[in-house]
């Protein structure tokens, strides 16, 4: 027995030593790719010495003799910190993920190939201005210079992730940057999924009830000219969806399209008598995040703000004399077309002029550890043909038909990067407005401020639709009807422009920007009807604003929705009946109502009320729609405040939703409110505990920044994923959009991944923050070092002063040209 224990001890000790050695080797190899920020490197492709000074937040400040050298430096810095992210995004746009990740990304590759994103980028490259082309080429040289350094120095393959997958990295091309912006445009739009959802809903409900559950934004009324069942009577309601997951593609289902806040105050409304601006673009959370902070010292002046790794320009930021911010416009930039296939020739579809052959070409999808597959890409006159499993298209496609899409992001004449180049080199609001003329996608609200003036302009392609369009672009339409097809683009000068005449404030929270009727509208589907109300209140509360008041508004967590819905829903429940015995559901309900009655609507992470309210409204909407919609009710993952309001105000007879069709009694809206509160409290008790006063919204509403590849790998996920308790909610200015699905439906997955506030009275007092950190390397201290500041609503300084950038930084990289 002693011998047995001796050998057992030896085996255990040996295993422990081997595990420690393995861990050390993994750490050593992984850490080899950590860049040395305080180094001198000789590179090919620059005209003169180049300096990359990184401040204490690891933001690179890039100084060179020429603009091309500065763009080279940005490419070098992006590659140092985010190489794996850039390669992943490029593979996504190219439809080549399966070469590395195998079967699980095959559907993503097929979709991206069918959309022909990279082909459109290649066609757009020759159309850029000479200056933009030079910048793109210089940037690509900078990225490739870092790849060369990795190969020369055996620097851990460039990122730890490359050890787990094939490490071959092709050099960066200008076309790659164009493709990445197109990928951003695809991620910003959810109009396709919104069209499908409306079509599926209209198969089950009369048009007046569709208006309840999918309400138009308040304003001029609109009507649906034809419902989907009329256009395509053979489609069966409640056809099960295929639920295809597009891994790493980031393509959106409603309501996960683009979002953001931006506002600016003219000098007359600023305490300092100089313009102010605040901007926080919203994107899906990831680790590393989508944004990367950088400062470029160009010949036209210093530029600092948020960039996207892979794209050489500052997307949102400021100069000494100009700042710009962006929000998603929700322009209806995509339409689905149901195409009738010729029953005698499957390569033809019906057009206004009869059957016509589709353009087609083969495409080989290479899949790791499997034989390659060849797919046939097809295009109709309306655009590329989509796979039936994409966007739940199988649920709305009749037999003998296919679906194509027209989408501005797929333009083969996309000069958006040239527009961004011009914007970065503008110095006044007027010059900034002119720069937006060539922008194609994504459609944006561009807010501009110089020291003395502010303005906001809608930029990006907006399709012209025929006044006789069958569905006004709200649901998939018949592709063979000429009136349904796009007829070109709206003129840039006709897109909304907001300029305060005599002092004022402009802003956008993805709210409705125009009441123009169809076909002169921009959209029927808007991103916000709630945050805008809270924003207007905060802006009107002060005669003049300061940087601090803009920061306060940017981090505001009061829910206008909670303040407006609770008095409606709970009107017959407040303080009614005798005190119920302890331990009963009635007592728990009374305790919850007491908490909510004394709550001010603040979605604070430390409070229980936001969780009780959110669970109640979620359960309430589910009870209201489940019997009418059946399985489709699961597609409504988020509470629609306008729907709840319509029901409880009985707008257009909407209170009919309260009666459960399958039950004998006639339920009132008060009955449903009470029952759904009991449902919510039961779920909260099972999930988080029954002590209501001890609940924390932040426990349910944790921000989940997940690594797109390693985020689900056992053990590694605890290293690469970033989780933070957060305040806010779906409808607060400090927006934290919940997932809406799964066991943790209130997880925060989409919000302000970048925040910036700019004050032209003291430009160097401007501040900014991103949600994680500058580095994409999990072993870097800059992987998540900005995350805690972001969570607390704090910022770091944003200076254009070279001396401050160099002082007490994390290092200065000197790039020297080869002889």
Image (spheres, rainbow, N blue to C red):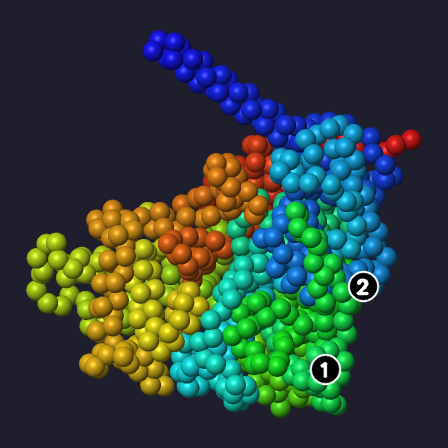
- Left or right: where 468 falls relative to 573: right
Residue 412 placement: quadrant: bottom right
Q: Residues within 10 Å of mark 1 (few under 14, many from 20)?
A: few
Q: Position of residue 167 (x, y in %)?
A: 70, 39
> Which corner quadrant holds the N terminus?
top left
Which residue is found at the position 73% from the left and 28% from the top? 154
Residue 355 appears in which quarter of the rendering?
bottom right
Q: Of all residues shown, which one is farthest toward the right?
A: 819
- Residue 253 is labelled as none
Q: Is residue 465 visible?
A: no
What residue did someone put label 1 on? 345
Q: Is residue 431 left or right of residue 226?
A: right
| Rendering quarter of residue 405 | bottom right
In-front residue for pair 1/190: 1
- Extreme residue in the top direction: 2
Label 2 to label 1, Cα distance in Å?
Answer: 31 Å
Q: Quick one: 747 or 595, which is closer to the camera?
A: 747
Q: Residues within 10 Å of mark 2 (few under 14, many from 20)?
A: some
Q: Secondary structure at mark 1?
A: strand
Dot label at residue 123: 2
- Measured as percent of width and height from the top left, residue 568 is found at 28, 72
| Residue drawn 46% across the image and 17% down it | 11
Depicted 789 relative to depicted 618: above or below = above
Q: Along the line of sight, which residue is nearer the eye, 154 or 566?
A: 154
Q: Secondary structure at mark 2?
A: helix
Q: Quadrant of the C terminus?
A: top right
Instruction: Answer left or right for 753 relative to 739.
Output: right
Does label 2 or label 1 sit earlier along the sequence? 2
Query: Which percent across, then down, holds residue 671?
Result: 21, 73
**Is any part of residue 38 visible from this angle?**
yes
Q: State the residue at coordinates (67%, 72%).
A: 385
**Residue drawn at 69 percent across, 88 percent down:** 482
């Amino acid at each position: 027995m002693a011998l047995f224990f001796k050998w057992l001890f030896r085996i255990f000790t040996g295993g422990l030593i081997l595990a420690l050695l393995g861990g050390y080797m993994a750490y050593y190899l992984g850490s080899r790719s950590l860049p040395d920020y305080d180094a001198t490197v000789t590179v090919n492709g620059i005209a003169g010495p180049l300096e990359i000074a990184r401040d204490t937040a690891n933001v690179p400040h890039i100084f060179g003799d020429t603009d091309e050298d500065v763009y080279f430096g940005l490419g070098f810095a992006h590659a140092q910190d985010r190489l794996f992210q850039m390669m992943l995004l490029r593979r996504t746009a190219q439809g080549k993920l399966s070469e590395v990740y195998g079967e699980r990304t095959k559907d993503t590759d097929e979709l991206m190939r069918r959309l022909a994103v990279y082909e459109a980028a290649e066609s757009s490259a020759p159309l850029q201005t000479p200056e933009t082309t030079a910048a793109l080429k210089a940037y690509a040289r900078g990225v490739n210079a870092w790849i060369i350094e990795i190969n020369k120095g055996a620097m851990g393959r460039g990122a730890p992730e490359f050890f787990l997958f094939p490490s071959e990295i092709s050099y960066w091309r200008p076309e790659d940057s164009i493709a990445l912006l197109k990928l951003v445009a695809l991620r910003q739009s959810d109009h396709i999924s919104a069209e499908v959802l409306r079509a599926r809903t209209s198969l089950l409900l009369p048009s007046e009830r569709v208006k309840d559950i999918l309400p138009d934004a308040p304003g001029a009324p609109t009507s649906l000219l034809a419902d989907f069942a009329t256009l395509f009577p053979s489609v069966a309601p409640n056809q099960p969806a295929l639920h295809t997951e597009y891994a790493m593609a980031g393509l959106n289902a409603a309501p996960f399209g683009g979002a953001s806040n931006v506002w600016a105050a003219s000098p007359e409304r600023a305490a300092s008598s100089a313009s102010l601006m605040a901007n926080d673009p919203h994107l899906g959370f990831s680790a590393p995040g989508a944004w990367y902070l950088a400062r470029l010292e160009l010949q036209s002046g210093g530029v600092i703000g948020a960039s996207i790794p892979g794209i050489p320009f500052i997307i949102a930021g400021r100069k000494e004399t100009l700042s710009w911010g962006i929000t998603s416009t929700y322009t209806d930039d995509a339409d689905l077309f149901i195409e009738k296939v010729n029953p005698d020739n499957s390569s033809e579809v019906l057009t206004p002029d009869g059957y016509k052959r589709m353009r087609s070409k083969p495409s080989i999808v290479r899949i790791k550890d499997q034989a390659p597959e060849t797919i046939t890409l097809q295009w109709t006159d309306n655009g590329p043909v989509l796979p039936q499993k994409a966007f739940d298209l199988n649920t709305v496609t009749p037999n003998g038909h296919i679906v194509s899409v027209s989408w501005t992001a797929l333009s083969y004449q996309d000069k958006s990067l040239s527009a961004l180049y011009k914007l970065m080199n503008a110095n006044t609001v007027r010059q900034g407005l002119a720069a937006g003329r060539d922008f194609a996608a994504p459609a944006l609200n561009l807010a501009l401020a110089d020291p003395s003036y502010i303005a906001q302009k809608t930029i990006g392609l907006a399709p012209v639709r025929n006044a006789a369009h069958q569905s006004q672009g709200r649901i998939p339409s018949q592709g063979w009807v000429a009136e349904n097809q796009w007829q070109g683009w709206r003129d840039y000068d006709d897109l909304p422009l907001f300029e305060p005449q005599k002092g004022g404030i402009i802003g956008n929270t993805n709210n409705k920007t125009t009441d123009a009727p169809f076909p002169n509208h921009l959209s029927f589907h808007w991103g916000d009807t709630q945050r805008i109300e809270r924003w207007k209140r905060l802006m009107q509360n002060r005669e003049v604003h300061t940087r601090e008041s803009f920061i306060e508004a940017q981090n505001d967590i009061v829910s206008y929705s909670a303040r407006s819905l609770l008095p409606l829903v709970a009107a017959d429940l407040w303080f009614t009946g005798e005190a119920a015995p302890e331990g009963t559901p009635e007592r728990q309900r009374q305790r919850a109502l007491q908490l909510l009655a004394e709550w001010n609507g603040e979605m604070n992470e430390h409070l229980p009320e936001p969780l009780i309210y959110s669970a109640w409204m979620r359960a309430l909407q589910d009870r209201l729609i489940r019997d009418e919609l059946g399985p489709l009710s699961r597609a409504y993952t988020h509470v629609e405040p306008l729907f709840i309001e319509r029901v409880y105000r009985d707008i257009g007879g909407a209170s009919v939703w309260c009666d459960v069709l399958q039950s004998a009694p006639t339920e009132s809206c008060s009955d449903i409110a009470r029952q759904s509160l009991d449902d919510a409290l039961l779920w909260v008790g099972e999930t988080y505990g029954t002590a209501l006063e001890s609940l924390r919204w932040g426990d349910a509403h944790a921000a989940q920044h997940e690594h797109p590849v390693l985020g689900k790998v056992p053990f590694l996920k605890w290293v690469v994923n970033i989780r933070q308790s957060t305040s806010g909610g779906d409808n607060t200015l400090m927006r934290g959009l919940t997932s809406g699905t799964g066991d943790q439906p209130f997880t925060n997955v989409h919000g302000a991944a970048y925040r910036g506030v700019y004050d032209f009275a003291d430009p160097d007092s401007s501040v900014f923050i991103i949600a994680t950190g500058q580095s994409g390397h999990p072993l870097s201290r800059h992987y998540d070092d900005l995350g805690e500041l972001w969570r607390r609503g704090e910022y770091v300084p944003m200076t254009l002063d070279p001396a401050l950038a160099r002082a007490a930084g994390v290092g200065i990289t000197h790039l020297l040209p080869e002889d």
